[in-house]
Amino acid sequence: MDKSLDLSFDHLVSLQQDNGCWEGEMVWCTMILSQYVIVHHLVGRTWEERTRQRILRHFEVTRTAEGAWGLHPESAGYVFTTTLAYVALRLLGLPPD
């Protein structure tokens, strides 16, 4: 086996937790979070305020400079994902503007 491959494998294994997982950053697609908020509302569940604030923060930091939402942080805004985000934000109690 190639030495660089062995080194890479050893490094990867060194990062693995005892339970077999690796810790890493998860970048959510705004569309998935929007749909989660909508379904949460449709089934009649309420939010803990801390969770609600964290969801609002996610929408805040993933919005493009033009005020839209895309499929990922580097994506341009799309009408579909922006509409879903708008509906979700309204369901979370934000005003229309």
Image (cartoon, helix red, strand yellow):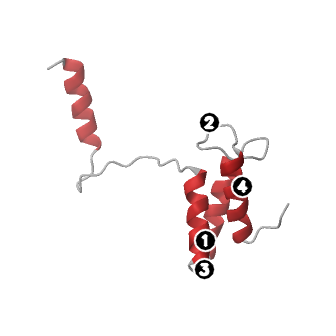
Q: What's the residue type where badge 1 is placed?
A: Arg
Query: Residue 72: image x %, image y %?
Result: 58, 42
Displayed quadrant of residue 94: bottom right
- Mark 3 or 4, nearer chain start: 3
- Mark 2 or 3, nearer chain start: 3
Structural distance between the alpha carbons of marks 1 and 3: 12 Å
Q: Is residue 83 left or right of residue 10?
A: right
Near-viewer residue (65 or 84)? 84
Q: Is residue 64 left or right of residue 32?
A: right
Mark 1 vs mark 2: in front? 2
Residue at screen point 61% across, 75% down = 41
Q: What's the residue type where badge 3 is placed?
A: Thr
Near-viewer residue (18 or 46)? 46
Tag shown at residue 83: 4
Mark 1 vs mark 3: in front? 3
**Residue at the front extreme of this rendering:** 80
Query: Residue 61: image x %, image y %?
Result: 67, 49
Residue for badge 2: 74
Mark 2 vs mark 4: in front? 4
- Mark 4 or 1, nearer chain start: 1
Structural distance between the alpha carbons of marks 4 and 1: 24 Å
Q: Quadrant of the C terminus?
A: bottom right
Tag shown at residue 76: none
Structural distance between the alpha carbons of marks 2 and 4: 18 Å
Give above or below for 62 relative to 34.
above
Q: What's the residue type where badge 2 is placed?
A: Glu
Query: Residue 33: image x %, image y %?
Result: 57, 59
Q: Is residue 47 visible?
A: no
